[in-house]
Image (spheres, grey):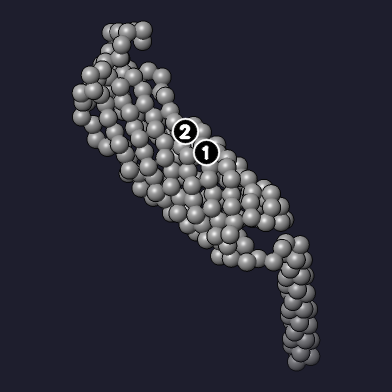
Amino acid sequence: MKKSVVLLLGCLLLYASSEAQYRVRRNVRHRSSSSRRFERLPEFKPSLNLNFGYGFPNLDKNELLGFYDFYRGSVNQTDPVFGSVDYQFRRTSSIGLMISYGKVSAPYYDVFSSSSEPPAFTGQLKNWAIMLNFVKYAPLNGKINPYIRTAIGVNMWDQAYLDDEGNKAVVADDPTALAYQASLGVKFKLSKQSGLFLEAGYGKYILSGGLSLKF
């Protein structure tokens, strides 16, 4: 009986020892593989990034109101332009501020009239948005950087629904105060200080592209 217990304890100790050695070797291989992956990237230094872009379409058009007994005509839009300044404190992370501007307008017609007739009034929205901007990078190499952008902040609206004479035709509540943008993107490095970026997402725009500068 004692021999069996000793044998069993010996087997358990041997198993535990081999398992521990396996885990150590696996962790060493994992760290070694991770280290080799980052060795291929240039040395990281914190930087200040300036980005200037143009989005399409202007999703502020969704904030134009609908009215009983009137229908909305085609929307005219100035697609949003935006800029951001970000402090990249890690190879994979940055935080900063993003500002965008855009304008949309549309005619409204009486339901008993046709679009060939003058509109009853015209609605217009001008928007400035200020958002905190968080970017998470997944660097592939020194030339290509995929990333995820999450920006959230406030909208500042200039809203008007006016008739042909410029008089206020409708009194309406302001659109939503929440501004946001969530995007998947990629940066293409052109030089040490410059690059291009492309994005697809939702919020202020669906597609965008622009110039990125690094300092």
Seen from the viewer's position, the closer of residues 77 and 201 is: 77
N-terminal-most mark, 2 or 1: 1
3 and 58: which is toward the camera: 58
Question: Quick one: quadrant of the C terminus?
Answer: bottom right
Q: Can residue 19 be seen in this view?
A: no
Toward which corner of the image does residue 199 lie, by quadrant?
top right
Location of residue 67 in the rendering, given as x and y in whole percent from the top left corner: 27, 23
The amino acid beneath tag 1 is: Tyr
Which residue does the image show at 27% across and 30% down from the upper left? 160
Q: In which quarter of the image is the N terminus?
A: bottom right
In which quarter of the view is residue 179 placed?
top left
Q: Of 36 and 115, which appears nearest the observer?
A: 115
Residue 140 placed where, x, y %?
A: 70, 54
Q: Name the residue under label 2.
A: 79
Residue at x 28%, y 8% (from the top left corner): 112
Q: Residue furthest bottom?
A: 2
- Check disc 1: other Cα within 10 Å, few if <14, some if 14-19, many if 20+: some
In the rendered view, does 170 fall on the left or right side of 31? Answer: left
Q: Which residue is drawn at 39% across and 33% down?
A: 103
Against 103, residue 91 (above or below) is below
Q: In this view, does 164 lie to the left or right of 43?
A: left
Against 84, is 157 above or below? Answer: above
Q: Are marks 2 and 1 in contact (CB under 8 Å)?
A: yes
Position in image of residue 134 (x %, y %): 50, 55
Going 69% across and 49% down the picture, which residue do you hit?
190
* Residue 38 position by quadrant: bottom right
Distance of label 2 from label 1 (alpha carbons): 7 Å
The kind of secondary structure element at disc 1 is strand
Write down the residue under mark 1: 54
Q: How many marks?
A: 2
